[in-house]
Image: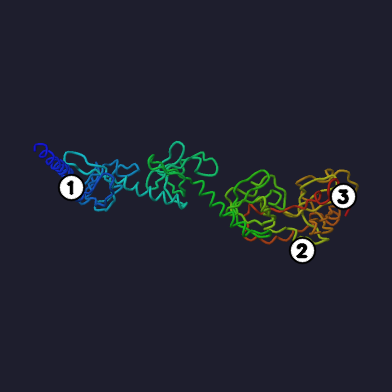
Amino acid sequence: MVDERKHDEAPNDTRNEMEEALKMEDSLGFGIGGDARPGDILRGKVVHISQDGVLVDVGAKSEGIIHMRDLSHRRVERADEVVQLGEEISVYVLGYEGDEGTMKLSKRRADEESAWERLEDAQKNREVLEAPVVEVVKGGLVVDVGLRGFVPASLIAPGFVHDLEPFLGQTVRVRVLEIDRHKRRAILSRKDVLAEETKAKQDEVWSKIEEGQLWEGTVKSLTDFGAFVDLGGVDGLLHISEMSWTRINHPSELLEVGQPVRVKVIRLNPEKGKISLGLRQVEGSPWDKASQRFEEGRIYRGQVVRLAPFGVFVQLEPGIDGLVHISQLADYRVNNPAEVVEVGEEVAVKVLQVDPERKRISLSKRDADAEGGLDAAVEAPAPEPEDETPRRMTAYHAGDWQDELGQGEEPTEA
């Protein structure tokens, strides 16, 4: 009989212990109707803001508290930088503290939980995110993607980035590469996004570009042999020989980095991804109207620009040089042009022949001197103004007879 009574009392003792435990949980204030547990995410209203933190009404017996460190994943000095009085926010239940069992909440954890879900979706769908850079640290950038995401320096741009400070405060476009909730790690890449955007721009340019077209571009860099021009995602080479109708020593004489420029597509090589550009072709050759501007038989003023064993080159105007053959320098035999003229000297010359197609003008100093010299010379008509051509880019090609004649050949006597 004794054993049977003990056996009957055992279930009652267990039931009483469970009831006491439930009463204890309720006395500690376990949330709304006793259902809130650590790890739950609730909605509540901000009812008080102080220097120490924020009180939030989540419908429990008393307000829950968010300490400053649990307000945001960003570093903040004041709670009102994050929340406003009366604002409804999501909070994460951390637990309970104090003798009264005050509910301990975290807005930061609630935001991060939501952010983790968004990052997982973004990684799955290869979505591009926009994220402000909130901190520059050793080895990369810290960005705000609802939590602290990290962009390693090697994943910021296709090339090596020496200075990361200019990125602080900027909003960058990134893609999720790796996430680990347990380690609270999110690795992002800006380089991948830039590479894809550049590829898209390049494909668009190559789908439209054709030889002979005029394109607007921007000077990207200068070298000794030319300039690279950005055509909107694809770089074309503007060789120094295609910049001007006259010889120049360096591209910086005409262009500067960042300068907008209009160029002509000369050659395309899609297989190698190369585009050859021309600048002088856009402006037009000064030789196109040379026969109209310089009449055969008339005397003009000019300047000696170069001496050669076979004669003298005289500039009639920028871009138009004519040749005075050694036999046309004087009314006596000349062995060396330096006996008669020097570079920079102003002389009178008579036009004997104009050949615009070969870019040649044959001149005679001997005949001009016999007919009055500089007193009989006239100025060439003023050239028509170029259409909105920047002054630095206005340069022409003086007729290069030696290149036209070939190696070692001399012009025949006019």
The dot on residue 292 is 2
Residue under numbered circle 3: 330
Report the Cα–Cα distance between label 3 and label 1.
113 Å
Q: Distance between the residues labelled 2 and 3?
A: 27 Å
Residue 215: % across, % down = 62, 58
Q: Which of 114 and 397 is in front in this view?
A: 114
Count residues near mark 1 (Cα–Cα under 10 Å), then give few for <14, some for 14-19, many for 20+.
some
Q: Which residue lies furthest to the front in this view?
A: 1
Residue type marked 2: Gln
Mark nearer the N terminus (1 vs 2): 1
Q: What residue type is labelled 1?
A: Ser
Q: Which of 100 and 131 is in front in this view?
A: 100
Q: Residue at x 11, y 40 (%)?
A: 9
Q: What element carries label 1?
A: loop
- How many residues crowd around disc 2 within 10 Å: few (fewer than 14), some, or many (20 or more)? few
Judged from the image, the secondary structure of the residue bearing numbered disc 3 is loop
Residue at the spot of label 1: 62
The percent coordinates of residue 16 (x first, y second) are 13, 42
Which of disc 1 and disc 3 is earlier in sequence?
1
Identify the image quadrant of the N terminus.
top left
The C terminus, quarter of image? bottom right
